[in-house]
Amino acid sequence: MLSGPRLFGVRLAAEGIGVYEVRPGIIDTDMTRAVKDKYDALIADSVPAQLWGSPADVAATVRSMAEGDLTYTVGQAVRFDGGLTIPRF
């Protein structure tokens, strides 16, 4: 059973409509800046990229989505998390 962006992506792809889900991870914003110093060491240890993401990181891909640059991408959830959710063995 398809759900979320995959379901709508499949249904709308033939119409040329892209469906995406944006899943930001740990992003350096005004809201998170108050705890940044406290969590910097934890980020360095648990996020493969060893850094906080920026709003510009998210905006660059969202802009590509909005401009229609991802024409062969259908129903995807795009994660911006520096590799945090990639299983490591």
Image: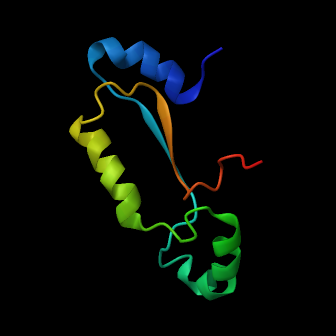
Q: Residue 35, percent across and down?
A: 63, 83
Instruction: Answer above or below: position of 11 versus 64.
Output: above
Residue at x 40% of width, y 30% of height: 19
| Relative side of 52 to 47, left or right | left
Q: Residue 53, percent across and down?
A: 48, 66
Furthest residue in direction right, as rendered: 89
| Closer to the camera in the image, 25 or 7 | 25
Residue at x 28% of width, y 49% of height: 63
Residue at x 28% of width, y 15% of height: 15
Q: How many marks?
A: 0
Residue at x 58% of width, y 70% of height: 50
Question: Which of the colour schemes (rainbow, by chain, secondary structure, one colour) is used?
Answer: rainbow
Q: Residue 69, percent across and down?
A: 24, 36
Q: Residue 45, percent across and down?
A: 70, 71
When asked about the image quadrant of residue 43, the answer is: bottom right
Quarter of the figure with the N terminus = top right
| Closer to the camera in the image, 19 or 84 | 84
| Relative side of 47 to 8, left or right | right
Instruction: Answer above or below: position of 41 versus 67.
Output: below
| Closer to the camera in the image, 12 or 61 | 61
Furthest residue in direction front, as rendered: 89
| Relative side of 54 to 60, left or right | right
